[in-house]
Image: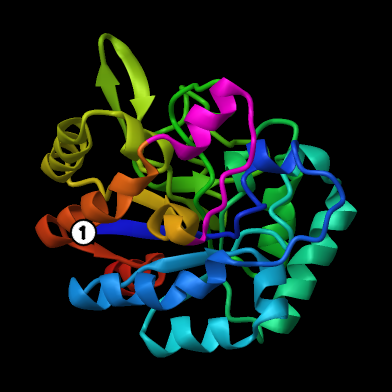
Amino acid sequence: MNLLGIDFEDWYHPELIQQTLGKEKKIPKVINGLDKILDLLRKNETFATFFVVGELIEFRPEIQDKILNDGHEIGFHTMYHTNLNKMNSECFDNEVKRFAEITNKKSRGFRAPTFSLNSNTSWSIDILERNNYIYDSSMVPAKTGMYGDPNAEIKPYKISSSSLSRDDPAAKIIEFPLMITSFLGRKIPTGGGFFLRTLPFKITKKAIYNYQKKHIPSTFYVHSWELTPEFMPRIKLTKRDNFITYHNIQKVMKRMNELLSNFQFTSFEKYLNKIN
C-alpha cells in the first residue's frame, strides 16, 4: 500500500510565487477545484490525506467537511504556507494551536511547506509532539536546489528534533519520507510535484514498483493547483521559476489518474490504523 498526500494550497502559496507577489489582495481560486479532486479520488476508490493551508479553511470552512465526508484525512500545512525557515518556534506553536481550533483537533499529521524541515527548523518536531501529532511527512532523502537531506532514511522511521535523518527509537513521531530513486548515479526525488511533471513518467512508475518490491510504502504527493490548472493563474516569473512552477502542469491530472488506476494508495491515517 502506498501513501497519497494532497498539498491543498491556493495559487499564491507556492514559494516561488510568494516571493514575487506584492501586497495585492490574494483571493483564493484553487479551492474551487476541490470537487474535481474529490471526483478523481472517488473514481479510483482512493483515500488521501489533504495537507491543508489553514487560511483556506478559515476562508471557506465547508472545505473540511467535504474532505472528511468522503473519508479522507485533514493534515496541517501551516496557516499561510510559510517556509519554516522564515518562522520561529513561537509563531509555529501559535499556528498549530490555531489549526487545532478551526479543525476541532482533527489533524494528526504535518507537512512543512517546501519540505523546509531541516537542522535549522528541527524545533518544529518538538512542538508537533507537544500538540499530540503522531506523524510528519517533510523529509526528502535526496538533495535538490530548494530542499532535501540525502542522508535521510527512505522507509518510515521515528523522528526527533535531535535525529531528523535516522531512526530514534525513543521518539514519538513517525516520519514518512518522500519517495526517491537513483538516476544516473545520484538520488533524485520521485514522490510527486515538479518531478511528476518533469521526469519521464516511466521513472515514477518504476520507482513505485521498486518500493513495493522492498515492502516500503511509497509516499507520494501532488499539489491541488497541479490537479486544477484551470484555476491557477500564470504569474510572471523568471524563466527558471516559471519552469519549476508550471512545466507540464496540464499533464498532471492524466498522470495521477493512471497512477491511481494502477497502484493502491491510501491516507496516512488509514495506513497507520491498518498496521497498528
Q: How many numbered discs?
A: 1
The residues colored magenta run 231-247
Name the residue rendered at 40%, 42% in the picture: 178
Question: Relative to the observer, which residue lies in front, 193 or 254?
Answer: 254
Residue 83: x %, y % from top left:
71, 43
Instruction: Point out the residue furthest to the top here.
Output: 185
Residue 74: x %, y % from top left:
52, 73
Amino acid type of the residue that numbered disc 1 sits on in the rendered structure? Asn
Q: Where's the N terminus, which quadrant? A: bottom left
Q: Examine the image and state in which quarter residue 101 appears.
A: bottom right
The residue at which mark 1 appears reads as 257
Residue 56: x %, y % from top left:
66, 71
Mark yes or no: residue 198 visible: yes
Question: Relative to the observer, which residue lies in front, 225 or 203?
Answer: 225
Q: Image check: 26 left or right of 61? A: right
Q: Is residue 262 above or below residue 268?
A: above
Question: Relative to the observer, which residue lies in front, 233 or 11?
Answer: 233
Residue 97: x %, y % from top left:
78, 72
Q: Is residue 174 magenta?
A: no
Q: What is the basis of the colouring in this image?
A: rainbow
Mark yes or no: residue 154 visible: no
Question: Mark 1 packing: few (<14 Cα in 10 Å), some, or many (20+)?
Answer: some
Q: Is residue 239 magenta?
A: yes
Q: Where's the C terminus, which quadrant? A: bottom left
Name the residue rendered at 24%, 62% in the picture: 265
Q: Image check: 2 left or right of 195? A: left
Q: Examine the image and state in which quarter residue 129 appears.
A: bottom right
Name the residue rendered at 51%, 37% in the picture: 245
Q: Image check: 231 left or right of 61? A: left
Name the residue rendered at 44%, 30% in the picture: 141
Q: Image check: 236 left or right of 97? A: left
Element type at mark 1: helix
